[in-house]
């Protein structure tokens, strides 16, 4: 079995993890102190009942004293009511503490995820991250709200029982704990077996989750190729392994519970036998025997609940280990200690001998150099994997380059804060992502700096206003997940509106017109012209017809710049661009005007 984060087993107790978890309790230590004090009281009230029953039997019933019996009964009832009230208050405050702690932890994890570089997300499934923020943190809620409190409660109950038992009869107390060595050994075996089984349960559960996520995401492919039966069969196999692991765990639980019951019954039997002999001898009273029988039942109750406590603790330790592993991940592109400001931005962009690899040694960009003048538009073309999108990712500083430098107005982007850098540019992707919410919020992205008038104006400029105003709620129209109810063209127009509303000095169109029909392309092209006006812009497109008016075209091949020039200049060279153009327009005659050929400088 290959162990991943989802199969981390975790110890039932890890002092280092617990110490780190307790830091989150520190702001709410008053709740914890209060809970501990209440536990001392409520734990003492429980064992007090056998003591009151002993007094009732030995003093009131034996002497036929109805008055004292009534008083003891009232006291007994009062202790039960008081115990219930304290238990209610205790439960409320521990749950409140748990909710406050996981709220803080969840915010911290989500905030940390927001800071991580794209390199982290390239290698980490989204489902795993979601599990950290939801399921794993929720498991810690059980620890803070139930686990820790239950452990304190059980310890205090056992301490109070021992105090009362040894104060009543030293001999009977020793008889009661005589079965403890056997109980400890049985508990040790149970913990070892359940630990191994728990590993299998988590492993197969992780496989189930992974399989479900992957195949629901690709359900259209499965249905298109009629693979439902084979996929169901594969799922049943994984599900069967998960079921078997759970059944194995049920077996050990089923053995452990009767074992505890047998030992409890054995202890009670020994108490009745030995205590009965003591009563016959006149050494102890009947009330003492009654009290010890109840003490024994109360003593074994926490032991019977051991499996639940063990599960809570082990799950919490495993979850906390995974959460802290995420929080300790330092795949973060840091801001400079003293960031430089771009005053009076002109929009000049320069790549100087840039080399970059997503994975060590596997360079996707090799010694790339080019320069853009302010307000200039450059198109980047090339086959899939040529490195086009990597240029955009590096300019946005989603990744750190291994060699070279990228400059805006002569300032290295490493010396500019990420927030300032991304504020001056907008990126329009081919696969437009729309969030759940209104069209208005999808354009503004909930920015307080963008007014409703600016939203409307941006939509008007790119031609999105027309279809938006035809919707029932217009700009307040709810957008379904990923914009499911909108056409590809409508989603792209909204993304153009989003880009324009932010009024960027640098505009990036990443393959923004490669998945639309010709009719929509005319509308999109008109919007693009308006977007590009007066801005430094980089365009990546598969349709070469969309970039013919670019000031320069950069041809990428295997991570290197192979050609630079205008559309007509590159056709005249009859190089890679010419061949790409031939592939797309093989039925059309390619017209190359007679002109003086000149060498094009390619840095």
Image (cartoon, grey):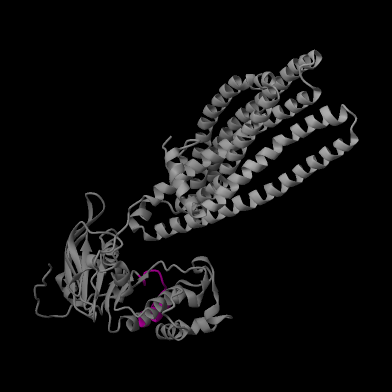
Does the magenta portion include 72?
no
- Quadrant of the image for the N terminus? top left
Rendered location of residue 78, percent (x, y): 78, 44
Rendered location of residue 50, percent (x, y): 75, 32
Q: Is residue 196 above or below residue 318?
A: above
**x 48%, y 41%: residue:** 317
Rendered location of residue 406, percent (x, y): 20, 66
Q: Main secondary structure of the magenta part?
A: helix
Is 567 positioned to the left or the right of 28 in the image?
left
- Residue 207 seen in render: no
- Residue 241 seen in render: yes
- Quadrant of the image for the C terminus? bottom left
Rendered location of residue 396, percent (x, y): 29, 67
Is 235 positioned to the left or the right of 506 in the image?
right
Is 89 positioned to the left or the right of 481 in the image?
right
Q: Nearer the viewer, residue 440 or 80?
A: 80
**To which quarter of the image does residue 83 belong?**
top right
Q: Nearer the viewer, residue 261 or 245?
A: 261
Q: Is residue 573 above or below residue 295?
A: below
**x 54%, y 56%: residue:** 100
**x 9%, y 75%: residue:** 598
Q: Nearer the viewer, residue 544 or 108?
A: 108
**To which quarter of the image does residue 601 belong?**
bottom left
Q: Which residues are magenta?
A: 512-526
């Amino acid at each position: 079995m290959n162990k991943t984060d989802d199969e981390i087993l975790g110890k039932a107790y890890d002092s280092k993890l617990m110490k780190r978890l307790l830091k989150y309790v520190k702001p709410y230590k008053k709740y914890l102190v209060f809970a501990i004090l209440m536990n001392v009281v409520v734990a003492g009230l429980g064992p007090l009942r056998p003591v009151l029953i002993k007094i009732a039997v030995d003093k009131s019933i034996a002497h036929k004293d109805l008055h004292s019996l009534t008083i003891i009964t009232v006291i007994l009832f009062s202790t039960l009511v008081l115990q219930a009230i304290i238990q209610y208050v205790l439960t409320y405050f521990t749950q409140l503490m748990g909710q406050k702690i996981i709220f803080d932890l969840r915010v911290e994890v989500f905030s940390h995820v927001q800071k991580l570089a794209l390199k982290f997300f390239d290698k980490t499934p989204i489902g795993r991250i979601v599990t950290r923020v939801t399921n794993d943190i929720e498991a810690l809620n059980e620890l803070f709200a139930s686990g820790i409190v239950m452990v304190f409660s059980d310890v205090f109950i056992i301490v109070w029982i021992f105090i009362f038992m040894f104060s009543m009869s030293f001999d009977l107390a020793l008889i009661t704990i005589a079965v403890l060595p056997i109980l400890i050994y049985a508990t040790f075996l149970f913990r070892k077996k359940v630990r191994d089984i728990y590993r299998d349960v988590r492993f197969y559960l992780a496989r189930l989750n992974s399989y479900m996520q992957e195949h629901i995401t690709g359900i259209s492919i499965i249905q298109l190729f009629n693979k439902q039966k084979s996929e169901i069969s594969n799922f049943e196999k994984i599900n069967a392994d998960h079921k078997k692991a759970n059944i194995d765990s049920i077996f050990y639980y089923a053995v452990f519970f009767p074992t505890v019951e047998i030992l409890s019954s054995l202890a009670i039997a020994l108490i009745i036998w030995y205590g009965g002999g003591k009563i016959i001898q006149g050494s102890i009273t009947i009330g003492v025997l009654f009290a010890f029988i109840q003490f024994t039942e109360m003593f074994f109750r926490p032991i019977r609940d051991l499996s639940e406590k063990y599960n809570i603790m082990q799950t919490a330790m495993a979850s906390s280990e995974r959460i802290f592993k995420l929080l300790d991940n330092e795949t973060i592109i840091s801001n400079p200690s003293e960031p430089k400001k771009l005053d009076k931005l002109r929009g000049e962009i320069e790549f100087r001998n840039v080399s970059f690899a997503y994975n060590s040694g596997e360079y996707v960009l090799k010694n790339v150099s080019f320069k853009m003048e302010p307000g200039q538009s450059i198109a980047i073309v090339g086959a899939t994997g040529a490195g086009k999108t990597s240029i955009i990712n590096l300019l946005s500083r989603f990744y750190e380059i291994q060699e070279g430098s990228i400059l805006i107005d002569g300032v290295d982007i490493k010396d500019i804060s990420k927030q300032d850098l991304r504020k001056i540019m907008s990126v329009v992707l081919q696969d437009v992502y729309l969030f759940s919410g209104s069209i208005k919020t999808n354009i503004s992205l909930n920015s307080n700096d963008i007014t409703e008038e600016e939203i409307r104006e941006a939509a008007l400029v790119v031609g999105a206003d027309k279809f938006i105003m035809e919707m029932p709620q217009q700009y307040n129209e709810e957008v379904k997940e990923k914009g499911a109810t909108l056409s590809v063209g409508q989603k792209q127009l909204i993304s153009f509106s989003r880009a324009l509303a932010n009024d960027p000095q640098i505009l990036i169109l990443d393959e923004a017109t490669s998945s639309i029909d010709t009719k929509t392309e005319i509308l999109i092209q008109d919007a693009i012209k308006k977007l590009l006006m007066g801005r430094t812009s980089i365009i990546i497109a598969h349709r070469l017809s969309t970039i013919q008016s670019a000031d320069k075209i950069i041809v990428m091949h295997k991570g290197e710049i192979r050609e630079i020039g205008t559309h007509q200049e590159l056709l005249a060279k009859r190089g890679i661009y010419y061949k790409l153009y031939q592939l797309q327009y093989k039925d059309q005659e390619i017209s190359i005007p007679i002109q003086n050929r000149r060498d094009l400088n390619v840095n």
